[in-house]
Amino acid sequence: MNPRLRWRKFVSNFMLTMTGLCAVVAVSVLFFILGYLVYYGGTSINWNFFTKLPAPVGETGGGMANAIVGSAKLLALATLFGVPIGFLGAIYLAEFSGSKVAFVVRYAADLLNGAPSIVIGIFAFSIAVHPFKQFSTLAGGFALGIMMVPITLRSTEQFLLAVPRTLREGAMALGASKWKTIATVIVPAAYRGILTAILLAFARVAGETAPLLFTALGNRYWSRGWTEPTASLPVMIYNYGLSPYEDWHRQAWAAGLVLLALILITNIVARAILSRGISVPR
Amino acid sequence: MNAFVRQAVSVNITPPVTTAATRETAAPAEMRMTISKVNFWYGAKQTLFDINLGIATSKVTALIGPSGCGKSTLLRTLDRMHETVRHSRLEGVILLDGKNILDQDVTQLRRRVGMVFQRPNPFPKSIFENVAYGLRINGSKLPMADAVEKSLRHAALWDEVKDHLHKSAYELSGGQQQRLCIARALAVEPEVLLLDEPCSALDPISTAKIEELLVQLKDLCTIVTVTHNMQQAARISDFTAFLLNGQVIEFSPTPHLFTKPTDPRTEAYITGRFG
């Protein structure tokens, strides 16, 4: 083998090893976190965790039933608020707007996407909490919803633009109006991608803590309604993790595990729905 | 020369001979569509120049010419699909049954003038729903199953798909998908069917099937097809228009155009000297 060929083979193998190693590192971080969470969270989780309220300070035991329900309520609110705005906005961008408007909206959405979540929290506080002199579940859902808008908008737009032009023309040539074309052909053709985008947005805000500190606040009891403060898993993890009590640390791990499971289950259910229906072959 | 054309010529549906020299149009009664003085621009670039053509009722009219000659553009003006392209501009008059299509509601127009595209473009739906689509969006009250069967039979696809109407349209072969698209267009019972190089993405056997189909469909509707394949135009069409650089160079009964072209440019093209 001549030296030049040997050198080439060496470079090829070296690069293969490096890229492979980096891929392994990237994946192992995820599995490391997962393993840690399952190990510490799994040993601390029990039936009480799902059914009981937090125990009074100083006592051990108790659970986070209020935070689980609180998180579910907050996420439902955020989805109801953020997804329609992001989705309909994306339809406007992809199908109707001129390129200048689209550029401005895209840029703004990207900036909003990059805004620190604590800034979103302060914004929601000044709009939805301060005027009413009241921390509330609604304000928390509003803050999380704002965060869902740009993620849903940008990815939905991408998936709509990826629908082949020939499908649009096919529908319009049959006498479908623009709106009918969108509703009956384009969105159905892109719906898998769109749902994936919504899931990503959902998973992203499910773990957000900072916006909730200013809005939903937290609550050691059952929230009495939508206009009252509510407990949520991320805020509980934050508070319990900072506490000096061994028992609370264990419960924080358990809360992390439950939060992850919540996201995972939503994901699996949505993907099961996705696997039905007909998709455009690539 | 097939029998049908000979008959057509003998009863003198005045082959709308609009060579550059003579611009006489046929009696409107026999024309489903009449295109007069059509000029077309994409932005600042003019792609059609002063087009005059008559589309004879229940006949196949073929548009031929080299790439970029404007034949697809001309076809797309007939159901105003050109309007989906930004910065396009059309001047002139296009009559459908004596009424200018440019003054009509565009969705209504497209229900009367159907279109089949270069590549099969079935929707991500079942075979059945693809054919039913046009009827559904038009709020048709017809029994859907009957209408779908009828269209699939017209498109010579029924026997191949009748046992799996609810499978994805993408499970069909390319040629079957194209016939499905024809069935989809036929379902709304258009008066005119436009086809934009319908066979260019298909194999020879599928092409033969579609050619055969088009000849049969003449009884159902008027057909205008764009093709870059001269043999295909010769086989299936009754009238042929030869376009070059956005102008109609010659328009006459197909056998006439292919055997006795009057313009030297037509002759050069059909004998393969360019294009």
Image (tube, coloured by chain):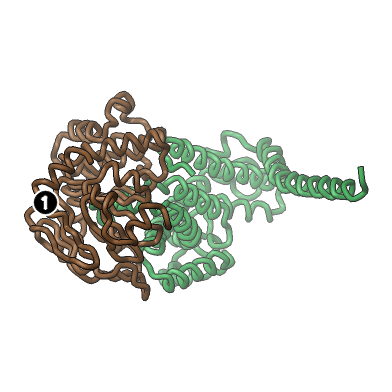
Chain colours: A green, B brown
Reply above or below: B102 against B215: below
Q: Position of residue A3 (x, y in %)?
A: 93, 48
Horizontally, is A108 left or right of B29 in the view? right
Residue A110 percent across, percent down from the top left: 53, 66
What residue lies at 24% left-to-right and 67% top-to-bottom?
B20
Front-most of A215 and A218? Answer: A215
| Viewer-nearest residue: A21 or A163 | A163
Residue bearing mark 1 = B13
A129 on left or right of B148: right
Residue type highlighted by circle 1: Ile
Q: Quadrant of residue B107?
A: bottom left
Q: Nearer the viewer, residue B119 or A86?
A: B119
Tell me the quarter of the image containing the N terminus of chain A: top right
Q: Secondary structure at mark 1?
A: loop
Q: Which residue does the image show at 38% across and 33% down from the upper left? A: B205
Relative vertical location of residue B29 with respect to residue B200 in this rendering, above or below: below
Q: Is residue A255 above or below residue A83?
A: above
Judging depth in this view, the residue of B70 and A164 nearest the camera is: B70
Q: Is residue B139 visible?
A: no
